[in-house]
Image (tube, rainbow, N blue to C red):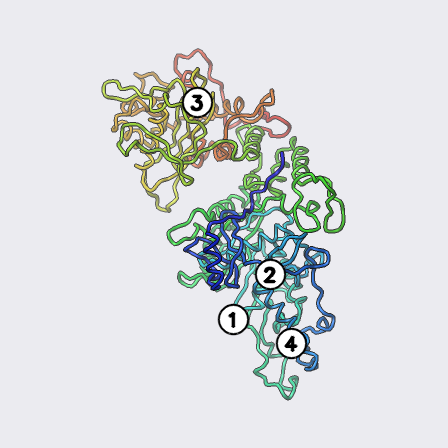
Amino acid sequence: MKYEQTLVKIIEPIKKTTISRLNKGKKWKYGYDKEHDIVVISKTGKIGQVVEIQNLRIGLPLEPKNVYVHPKNKWQKIEQPKELERLKNIFDWRNYPDEQKEQWFDYIDEEFKRRDEGFWFMNNGKPTYIVGTHYMYLQWSKIDVGAPDFREANRLFFIFWEACKADKRCYGMCYLKNRRSGFSFMSSAETVNLATLASDSRYGILSKSGADAKKMFTDKVVPISINYPFFFKPIQDGMDRPKSELAYRVPASKFTRKKITANEKLEDIKGLDTTIDWKNTGDNSYDGEKLALLVHDESGKWERPDNILNNWRVTKTCLRLGSRIVGKCMMGSTSNALDKGGDNFKKLYNASDVTQRNRNGQTKSGLYSLFIPMEWNYEGFIDEHGIPVFNNPDNDVLGPDGELIDYGIIEHWNNEAEGLKNDQDGLNEFYRQFPRTTEHAFRDEAKGSIFNLVKIYEQIDYNEEMGRSLGISTGNFQWVNGVKDTNVIFYPDPKGRFKINWFPPQHLQNNSIVKNGVRWPGNEHIGAFGCDSYDISGTVDGRGSKGALHGLTKFSMEEAPSNTFFCEYLDRPPTAEIFFEDVLMALVFYGMPILAENNKPRLLYYLRRRGYRGFSMNRPDRLWNKLSVAEKEVGGIPNSSEDIKQAHAAAIEMYIQDHVGYNSDGNIGKVVFNTLLNDWARFDINKRTKFDATISSGLAIMANNKHLYTPNAKIEKPALNISLARYSNKGLASKIIKK
C-alpha cells in the first residue's frame, strides 16, 4: 500500500476573489487574521497558498514573477564574494575604500531583504518558498557538517515556527521530534539570527542538564555567530569564543578614542546591548527575567527532581508583560520513557493542541504543538532536492551526496521494527527515537506491567496503521426534540465527547422495558457498559479525574459484533450533571445496563431518581439478600474490596489474552480505542484512581461475564495474585514470571 503523507496540505479556506482583491491593495498584514482565521507569515502584503500544518492554517507569500534558479535546479548555498569574505567586522568595512563599497550595496541590501521576507527558489522545477529564518540557517549558519542541507521537513518546521512568531496569541512551539532531526542546530541558528537583530534583549538556553545547555551554547550558538558575515555581525564584547555569555555590545574596555580614526565620533560605535546565555536546569531557571527567546532543548528528558511543567509555568511569565506576549519559546525534544520525564512532556505537548483554545484564543499551555513523523527527516532517505523518499522508487533517486536510494523509508523502518519484535523494550525505545506517530513517540517501557504488553502494543500499532479506516465516529447523544426520557439520537460533532465504533440497527435502538414504573434495558443480552464516575463538579486544582464510560458487546445472535468495545467516553464536563445525563442517554440509546462503582454514588442515585434503576446492575458477586440497603437501592459495585480489585484486573487480563493483538490464527483484535489500550499498558493496580479508562472498561467486562462471579457458580474463579504476577515482555508472546 502506497504511503500518503498527512503532515501538510494545501487548503482553500478563503475565496480566490477575496485573496486577489486584498492582494491588489497589499492589505494582508503579518500576524493572525481573525476574520479569515489564518496566520499570515507574508511581509509583502500579499498571500498565495494557504497551507495547514497540524491544524494551524498559514498564509504563505505570493509567488513572485521571477524565482531564483540555480544551475543545478535545487538549493545551493550562494558563495559570498571573496572580497567581502576578508572583512570580519564593521571596522574592516569602515577601512574599506569608499570607491569599492558601492558595488556591494545591492548585494548586502538583498541579503537583508531575504533575511526579512524569505526566499523563493526553483527546486526540481517547483517554485519553493523558505522563510527568512530558514534562509539564514541554510545560507549563513555553520553546523557540524559545514553548510546544512535543504530538507522539506525543515522547510515546514520553519514555516510553522514563523507562524508561531507571527501569532500574537502564541508563546511559541512545542516540537515533538525524532532523533537527529537537526532541532538543536536550527534553534541555535534562530537564536543568533534574532539576537543579532534586536537591541536591549536577552536570549536564553535550557536543556536536560546544565552541561547540555552549555555544550549547545559553546558548540553551536557561538560558532554560528562567529561565522556570520560582517554586515550581519554586531560588535561583540568579551572573548571570541565565550563559555557562558555571548554579548553584543560596545566593549568599552577595549576601544579608546585613539583607536578610532579622526573623522569618526565615539558615538558612532554602538552595540545592541543584547546577550545570549544558558542556565542550569531547574524549575526556577530564568525566573523573573525578561526573555525575547527561550530555547528549550531536550525538554522531554527532564528527570526528577527537575520538572518541565513546573519550569514552563515559571518561564512563561518571562515572555510576557501583563497580557502582552513579548517573547517566544522554541521547545523541542524526543521523549524519554514516561516515568523518566516523558510523562510531563507529553502533558505539555497535549496541552499545546491548536484545536483546543480558551476564550482568549490560546492553548492550555500557550504553545503550539508540532510533530513531524520520522519518515520526513531520516538520514539516507532524503533525495538531492531535500524531499523524503517515502515509498520504494520506480526510478533511480539520488541523495545529496550522489548515493543511490533504492528503497523507501517506510520499508526500512518496518524492517527495523520487525527485527526488534523479540525485544519489547528495545522496540519501544526505537519507536521513541524514530516515531511515525505521537503514540510511538510516547511509547512507554514494557517492564512492570501486569498485562500482556506485546498484545496491547500489537493492537496499538495496527490501529495507528489503519487510521481513519477504523470507522470511529465522534459526537454526542441528545434527546429527540430535547424532550427527556423519550428516544435518544446520536449527532456527529468533531468536538464531541463520545467516540463510537458501532451503532445498533434501528430496531435495537432505544430498546427498553417498563416494569412497575421502572425502566429496564431491552438489550442486556447484547452487551453492557462500565463506568468510573465522579461526584464533584469542580476540583481545587481544576483538573480532577475524568468521567469514563465504555460499552462492550458479548456474543449474541443479534446484528452486533462480538466481544467488541464500541463506545468510549473520557471527559469531565463543567458539571457532574452533564456527565450523568450523557451516561443516561448512552444507556437508553443502546438499551444496555451499566455496572458502576458505588463508592461515588451520585450517578446511581441520578439514574434511580429518573426512573432507570433497572439499568443499574447489582454487584454480581453477591446474592440479593446479601446486598446492603444502599446497594439494593441504587446498585453498583464497591472498589474497596481486594477481591473486587483482583477480579477486575483478572477480567481485563482475560479479555486482552483473548481479544487484543494477534491470535494464533494471525487475526487481529477489535479494540480500536488507543486511549484505552495505552491506559491498560500503564495500569498500576496500586494507583487505580489514575486510570479511569481501565476502571471503566474492566467493569464493562465484568458486567458481560457476571455469571463468573455469582456465589453459587460452579466455574472456579481464576486466582490472580496481582502483587506477584508480572509479565516478561520479551519474545513473541508475554509470559507470566513465576515465583
* Circle 3 residue: 553
- The residue most toward the top is 714
The alpha-carbon separation of the residues under discs 2 and 4 comes to: 35 Å
Tell me which corner region of the image, top left, top right, bottom left or bottom right, holds residue 205.
bottom right
Query: Pointer 1: residues within 10 angstroms few (<14), some, or many (20+)?
Result: few
106 in relation to 170, above or below: below
Please name whichever residue, 559 or 670, is drawn nearer the observer in this view of the structure.
559
Q: Residue at x 63, y 27 (%)?
A: 732
Comparing labels 3 and 1, the label whose residue is closer to the camera: 3
* Circle 2 residue: 65
Q: Is residue 376 visible?
A: yes
Q: Residue at x 67, y 43 (%)?
A: 389
89 in relation to 451, above or below: below
Residue 57 x, y percent position in the rendering: 49, 51
Please name whichever residue, 155 or 517, is drawn nearer the observer in this view of the structure.
155
On the picture, is 186 further left or further right than 612? right
* Circle 4 residue: 90
Residue 530 x, y percent position in the rendering: 40, 27
Q: Residue at x 63, y 83 (%)?
A: 256
Residue 635 x, y percent position in the rendering: 31, 24
- The residue most toward the bottom is 262
The mark that comes first in sequence, 2 or 1, is: 2
Q: What SS does tag 1 mark?
A: loop
| Tag 4: amino acid | Ile
**CB atoms of marks 1 and 4 within 8 Å:** no
Comparing labels 2 and 4, the label whose residue is closer to the camera: 2
The alpha-carbon separation of the residues under discs 3 and 1 comes to: 65 Å
The alpha-carbon separation of the residues under discs 3 and 2 comes to: 62 Å
Tell me which corner region of the image, top left, top right, bottom left or bottom right, holds residue 233.
bottom right
| Tag 1: amino acid | Asp
* Circle 1 residue: 200
Residue 484 x, y percent position in the rendering: 27, 31
